[in-house]
Image: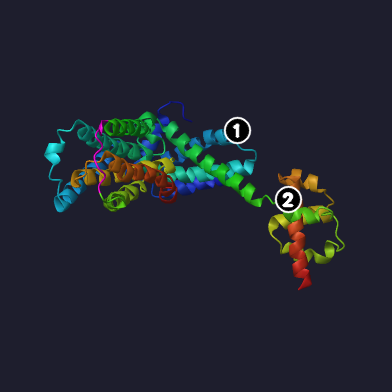
Amino acid sequence: MIDRTDSFEVLMRQSQNGDQQAYASLLKQTSLFLHTFLANRLRYTNEVDDLLQEILISIHKARHTYDSNRPYKPWVYAIAKFRLQDYLRAHYSDQLRQAIDLEDIEENFQESVTETAISFESISGEIKKLPEKQAAILQLMHQEGYTAKEIAEKMGMNESAVKVAAHRAYKLLRKKLEK
Amino acid sequence: MSNIDNLITRLAQDEIRVKTAPHPFILSLQWMGAAGIYLAVSLTLFGLRPDLLEKFHSVWFVAEIGVLLGILIVTSISAALLAFPDLYQKRNLALAPAWMLALFLLTLFLAWRADNPLIPLPVHSFECTLGITVMSLLPTVWIFSSMRRYASTHYRLAGSVALLSAFSVGALWLRLHEVNDSIVHVIKWHYLPMLAIGIIGLWLGQRVLKW
């Protein structure tokens, strides 16, 4: 356990000289405090883990830019914040990309996205070939009887996003079944 | 956390001995040294303006060259600091080009005010911008390829400052080579395009320096 403030710097210096054990120990300690840093800023555990892995890889790639005469933590946090901002930027722009113009789905507002004349079991083979998220939504809706709202909560999505994904899945299925 | 542990094990098994990056001041000195050599060679090839010694008696010309040289030095240091993730923990110095640019604009403004009676504009125009751009290409390639070896977390700003640094070499070359005393022309066709190119650097930094 690291109990001296300069230990990170010492470990990094040893790592830069090729000490693998020191490097593993340093990354382990770093991952602990970065986990807390990320957990305070992100909602889901899987996001925290994914981003933490990315940050550790970035630290590995940029390790030659660290000068052991300087404190270690500001250097690490600079990389962590950079990757976090990158992640959030990509996350929000992805959400914007997936947002659909209301006009595009206006015609489907009257249609119920939770009901269909075809039974789930009769087309389950085709459903399995759908993208993972869409297949999961259809399975929850039609086999397990969840509402769009419940699925949204379960999958960490917006209700409207669930409905849109379901709508897209129906479109794909319709195309496949018409062939 | 098992994924994290696996990753740490894999990273630690990698070749971890590294050659550490030079101090950013050394890095910027290398860039400035190369810029100095490049400037000397290009001025030898294309020639100095014949009235240069005489021009060094003009306060505003000396001030302009001095501030331009200052921009080259400060942007080189700043670009070197910006190439490091934590700006080498010298944030104020990394942002110093803003002060230098303010001083540059003030100098140009005062030189323009002092340009009375107005010196007639030369017949050429955009050729100067083109000349500065061509002369700046090599320093641009060199500084960007050098910065790519590090890990900038402010890649847009780094790109902008690096491009300003490279273009200040081109601007210096033209000012020492071309016989031209019209400050209006110099502002319009030398320095405004140079500052505009700094904005292109924001885009270039994102394309080239992102890692």
Q: Residue furthest bottom?
A: A179
Reply yes or no: does residue B179 show up in magenta. no
Q: Label 2, label 1: how many angstroms apart (C-alpha)? A: 34 Å
**Residue drawn at the location 46% of the way across and 39% of the way down:** A79
Mark closest to the chain's N terminus, 2 or 1: 1
Image spot of residue B52 (x, y percent): 14, 41
Q: How is the image coloured?
A: rainbow
According to the picture, the residue beneath numbered tag 1 turns out to be A40
Total labels: the figure holds: 2
Mark in front: 2 vs 1: 2
10 Å crowding of disc 1: few (<14), some (14-19), many (20+): few
The residue labelled by disc 2 is A102
User: Position of B37 compared to A35: left or right?
Assistant: left
Graded by Cα atoms within 10 Å as few (under 14), some (14 to 19) or many (20 or more), the crowding at tag 2 reads few
* Residue situated in front as seen by the camera: B54 or A167: B54
Question: Where does the N terminus of chain B fall, quadrant-wise?
Answer: top right
Q: Chain of mark 2?
A: A
Residue A21: % across, % down:
42, 41
Residue B35 as seen in the image, left or right of residue B102: left
Magenta residues, as a range? B114-122
Quarter of the figure with residue B4 = top right
The correct choice, above or below, for A88 with respect to A119 in the image is above
Chain of the residue under the numbered disc 1 shown in the image? A
